[in-house]
Image (cartoon, grey):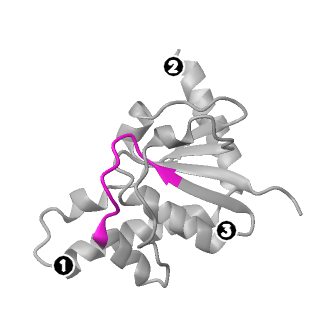
Amino acid sequence: MSKKIKILFLCTGNSCRSQMAEGLTRHFKGDTIEAFSAGSAPHGVDPLAVESMAKMGIDISKQESKHVSEFDGAAIDWAITLCDNAQKTCPMFPPPAKTVHKPFEDPPLLAKNAKSREEALAHYNRVRDSIKAFVEELPGVLEGLYQSQRKISISIK
């Protein structure tokens, strides 16, 4: 049996997008990928993220919000930042880890002015579905994303 790829999903609060990505990856890609999540300022798992995931039959209620420092020295193959703030604040992991940025909208921010729980949950469900589409392309999409982001970074310098 081949070794599972280790992916760490990063988001500032490790409360919503990264938690969803971890749960989706474990559910759909658990045979080939070992998924984790963390944040630079973790503040608990968002109850609406839990509810949104439960609607598709995935239980993330027992996942915990973790600080990225818990992964210092961990053998991570890929670190994927899911929000722009995490891209700026999360540390780089030493090789052979590769870091890529795949931003998704922030469900709590989108739902801030929702007039009902259902309206708020609709934002969570939409972002969840976008993350699911990305997860379904893992791990194949990562190398191309990495190479394209390296080219942009090199040409900016």
Q: Which residues are magenta?
A: 37-47
Q: Which residue is mark 3?
A: 29
User: Disc 1, disc 3: CB below 8 Å?
Assistant: no
**Tag shown at residue 117:** 1
Identify the residue under disc 2: 156
Q: Earlier in the sequence, mark 2 or mark 3?
A: 3
Kind of residue at badge 1: Arg
Q: Would residue 53 be counted in the magenta stretch?
A: no
Label 3, secondary structure: give it: helix
Q: Position of residue 3 (x, y in %)?
A: 82, 55
Label pair 1/2, CB-CB below 8 angstroms:
no
Kindly identify the residue that appears in the image at 40 percent across and 32 percent down: 89
Q: Amino acid at mark 3?
A: Lys
- Return the x and y of residue 105 as percentages of the image width and height: 35, 55
Badge nearest the viewer, 2 or 3:
3
- Residue pictured at 60% horizontal, 74% vertical: 27
